[in-house]
Image (cartoon, rainbow, N blue to C red):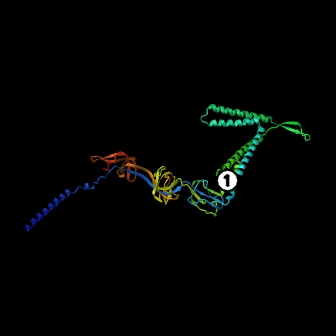
């Protein structure tokens, strides 16, 4: 029994020794736990490339100006000169009502030889009336006062011109003022003399012999009312002459001179303006150059005062588009845009932001920034108002710039940045850098690094 026990102790001892030796060898060959957990450092080279900061929006092409056109009266449409898509020019007659036939005839008669002769006669009559009004005033104030009244008016005009002239000297202005004072003095003097001594000789004629038998001499006092009436009549005669002369110039120039409203000075200009208004009510004209973008009428149709067509400008065309609220900082007046029309996806157009509306607008339930841009390209595909577009706003761009991935950039203080620059010996040095544009992936380096430098994440 003792024989079998002794060998068993030896076997157990040998097994334990072998297990211990194997464990020591295993742990000696295994890496440390700290070495397993330590992550490898990430590095990258500073490279050159392009960086563009942009935002994408959608919108439509709109005309810079759009005018809805309607007649001022109801009637039957007897003339329609345009169709959708036609180009039109300012004051072009687009349509006409049946009631316009007589109005057109009366309007054209103003510019006929008979109409011109009538206008010339009105000028002659106005000149005669002005002469009579001047004589009436001369009879009251005297010929001498009338002369000095004209001199006074000229002197006052000369003085005012000198006062408005920055190069006029003090001496010149004083001399002009002296001329005004002299003319006014003589005007007052002769007016008082004439009114104080105004007299009328009444000739008494014998009925049988037809001879003058005696004269009666009497003083006549001019009242303020008579003087006011005479001067008012003179001013009215002057206005009437200007009115007749202006009307004559218009009828001599032809119908093209009577397309816009007139400031009626008097009867003659009022007559022309009335004729213009009558014919205008039966014509439909466009106030702008553009194209017809809508038409809702046909020949023979009874139309009222509701709009029947729309004219829109096509030069320049504008783009009205929406950006997400988060892109508000990119919507800056002057920023360039790249416009892609859905109908021409391979022909992008250039433009520029000229207005950002001051309030947000709800689009599909989300707040959006409303932005306006003008198309800069003069050549390109045919565009029409209402076309759908995609707009890329270029908020900033850097071409052939030094770039590093954004995760290698560290903000050491507000607005100040640094990177870990790998030195030749493998050590890391925190190096300040000047940063330009940044997006979600890269940052532009304006200073502190060179192409090919190796930067690392934190040590």
Viewer-proximal residue, 170 or 74? 74
> Are there few (<14), some (14-19), or many (20+) residues within 10 Å of tag 1?
many
Query: Could you tell me residue 202's position as x and y percent?
Result: 85, 38
Query: Could you tell me residue 214's position as x and y percent?
Result: 89, 36
Q: Is residue 285 left or right of residue 328?
A: right
Q: Is residue 347 left or right of residue 417?
A: right
Q: Quadrant of residue 212?
A: top right
Q: Is residue 19 visible?
A: yes
Q: Which residue, as the protein is rendered here, is positioned at the far right?
A: 208
In this figure, which residue is indicated by the disc labeled 1?
276
Q: Which residue, as the protein is rendered here, is positioned at the far bottom?
A: 1
Query: Could you tell me residue 124's position as x and y percent?
Result: 74, 45
Viewer-proximal residue, 39 or 118? 118
Against 158, residue 248 (above or below) is: below
Q: Quadrant of residue 176?
A: top right
Residue drawn at x 75%, y 44% as measured from the top left: 128
Query: Could you tell me residue 136's position as x and y percent?
Result: 77, 41
Please state, as top left, top right, bottom left or bottom right, where the N terminus lies in the image.
bottom left
Q: Total label count?
A: 1
Residue drawn at x 64%, y 37% as measured from the top left: 161
Against 426, residue 221 (above or below) is: above
Q: Is residue 121 left or right of residue 91?
A: right
Q: Is residue 263 visible?
A: no
Viewer-proximal residue, 325 or 13? 325
């Amino acid at each position: 029994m003792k024989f079998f026990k002794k060998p068993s102790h030896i076997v157990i001892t040998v097994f334990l020794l072998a297990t211990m030796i194997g464990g020591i060898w295993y742990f000696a060959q295994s890496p440390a736990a700290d070495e397993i957990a330590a992550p490898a450092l990430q590095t990258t080279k500073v490279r050159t490339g392009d960086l563009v900061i942009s935002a994408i929006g959608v919108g439509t092409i709109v005309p810079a100006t759009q005018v809805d056109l309607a007649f001022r009266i109801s009637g039957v449409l007897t003339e329609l000169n345009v169709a959708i898509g036609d180009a039109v020019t300012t004051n072009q007659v687009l349509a006409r009502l049946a009631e316009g036939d007589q109005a057109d005839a009366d309007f054209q008669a103003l510019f006929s030889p008979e109409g011109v002769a009538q206008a010339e006669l009105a000028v002659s009559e106005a000149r005669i009336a002005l002469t009579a009004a001047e004589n009436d005033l001369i009879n009251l104030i005297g010929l001498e006062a009338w002369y000095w009244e004209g001199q006074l008016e000229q002197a006052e005009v000369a003085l005012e011109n000198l006062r408005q002239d920055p190069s006029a000297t003090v001496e010149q202005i004083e001399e002009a003022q002296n001329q005004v004072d002299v003319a006014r003095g003589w005007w007052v003097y002769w007016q008082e003399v004439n009114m104080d001594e105004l007299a009328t000789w009444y000739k008494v004629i014998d009925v049988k012999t037809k001879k003058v038998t005696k004269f009666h001499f009497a003083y006549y006092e001019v009242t303020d009312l008579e003087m006011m009436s005479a001067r008012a009549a003179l001013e009215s005669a002057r206005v009437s002459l200007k009115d007749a002369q202006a009307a004559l110039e218009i009828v001599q120039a032809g119908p093209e001179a009577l397309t816009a409203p007139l400031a009626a000075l008097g009867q003659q200009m009022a007559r022309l303006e009335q004729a213009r208004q009558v014919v205008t009510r039966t014509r439909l004209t466009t106030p702008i150059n553009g194209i017809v973008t809508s038409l809702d009428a046909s020949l023979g149709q009874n139309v009222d005062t509701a709009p029947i067509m729309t004219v829109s400008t096509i030069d320049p065309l504008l783009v009205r588009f929406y950006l997400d609220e988060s892109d508000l900082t990119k919507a800056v007046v002057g920023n360039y845009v790249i416009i892609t029309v859905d109908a021409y996806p391979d022909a992008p157009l250039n433009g520029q932001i000229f207005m950002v509306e001051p309030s947000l607008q709800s689009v599909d339930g989300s707040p959006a920034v409303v932005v306006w841009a003008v198309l800069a390209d003069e050549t390109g595909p045919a565009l029409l108002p209402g076309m759908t577009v995609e707009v890329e706003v270029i908020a900033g761009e850097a071409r052939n710039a030094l770039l590093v991935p954004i995760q290698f950039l560290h903000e050491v203080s507000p607005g100040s940045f640094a990177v870990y620059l790998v030195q030749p010996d493998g050590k890391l040095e925190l190096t300040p850098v000047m940063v330009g544009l940044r997006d979600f992936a890269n940052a532009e380096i304006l200073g502190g690094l060179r192409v090919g430098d190796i930067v690392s994440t934190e040590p």
